[in-house]
Amino acid sequence: MTQPRAVYIHVPFCAHRCGYCDFTLIAGRDDLAGAYLDALQAEIERSPLTEPLDTLFLGGGTPTQLDEPHLQRLLDLLRSAFRFSPDIEFNVEANPDGLTDAKLDALANAGVKRLSLGVQSFDDRFLSVLERRHSSESAIEAFGRCRSRFPDVSLDLIFAVPGQTLADWQHDLQTAIALQPNQVSTYGLTFEKGTTFWTRREKGQLDQADDSLERSMYGAAMDQLAAAGFEHYEISSFARPGFRCRHNQVYWNGGEYLGFGPGAASFDGGVRWQNHRSTTTWIRKVLAGEDAIGDREQLDPEASAREHLILGLRQIEGLNVAAFETQTGFALEPLGGEALSRLQDQSLLELTDDTLRLTREGRFFYDTVAADLV
Ligand code: SF4
């Protein structure tokens, strides 16, 4: 049996929970870092991997929220637990808030190649709305310090923030482009049930951007980033040639991966499982030698093929129909059925040269397309 060569490590700590965020994390509990690392080490030792890793991704939460000794311990643990292939893509998500030179040096010395900086906006008004703790100026300063240490630095930005105009967003894009990152990821703000943003919107305290403004903003991202030489290669991702994120491509191509840490997901080609989302429960279960998996799902072949289809369509170049059919064992047209024809009639999907892909218009409606095909 083959082993996954893509590993995800979830680091659940944040200084504060931003009002829009529903990720798996624990805010203001840095005192749990030692127990978290004990549990992570135990969990990794239970699933030894002998194959070298092609990609390793530290996400969160905020991996760089760990203080310097704990961050160093995490990096030492990963270096000793896994073999790295010579061209491993070692990714880390970072927050400009609290990003010290010592942490950046530790990451660079451990072999991190790709750093994703969660800037979200270059406008202090919208950073404040988003409850981010850094300023635009400190984010730009942090970007410079990352740039001097890592060959590949990417920026995350959020659009459709309450009160943000199209011109405000275009200014954010121009500022990002001027910094010359290797990738820019753009996300429309979502209001997830259970977040304080959801509650505040229900009470009329926050105005959600209307759909037409949000679409104009996404269109502006496509136009401005393409004009600056970025390739739009996934719904939310724009990269300079040669700088696409290989780890995320494993997910979108239906590949196998192993996740460690609270809430981390894994997939072995047929079964998908996710660790318990509560950090304290996950720590307690792992350290007690118990099963810390919260959900496990055996995908039947048809469900697996449909998931492969909608993940593949996230990629702007689309999916090769012959390869899809060989990999899943399902012919595309009967699987897609009436929805596939209708989405083509609506000019949201196009089937050309044996490739199925979203049209430009379809990129604005990916969620609708995916819901129709799943
Ligand atoms: S820093 Fe990121 S992960 Fe942490 S609460 Fe804010 S948005 Fe969520």
Image (cartoon, grey):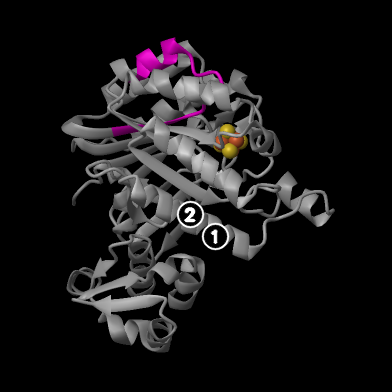
Q: Nearer the viewer, residue 357 or 289?
A: 357
Residue 15 higher or lower than 277, as above or below: above
Quadrant for ligand 1 reads top right
Residue 135 in sight from this viewpoint: yes
The residue tagged 1 is 216
Q: Is residue 98 inside the magenta stretch? A: yes
Name the residue type under label 1.
Answer: Ser
Residue 316 higher or lower than 346, as above or below: above
- Dot 2, crowdedness within 10 Å: few (<14), some or many (≥20)? some
The structure residue drawn at horizontal position 70% and vertical position 48%, both measured from the top left corner, is 162
Name the residue type under label 2.
Answer: Ala
Circle 1: element type: helix
Residue 300 pos. (x, y %)? 37, 71
| Residue 209 found in image quarter | bottom right
The residue tagged 2 is 220
| Residue 349 found in image quarter | bottom left
Q: Is mark 1 within 8 Å of ligand 1?
A: no
Q: Is residue 93 inside the magenta stretch? A: yes
Q: Nearer the viewer, residue 98 or 61?
A: 98
Residue contact between numbered discs 2 and 1, judged by CB atoms under 8 Å: yes
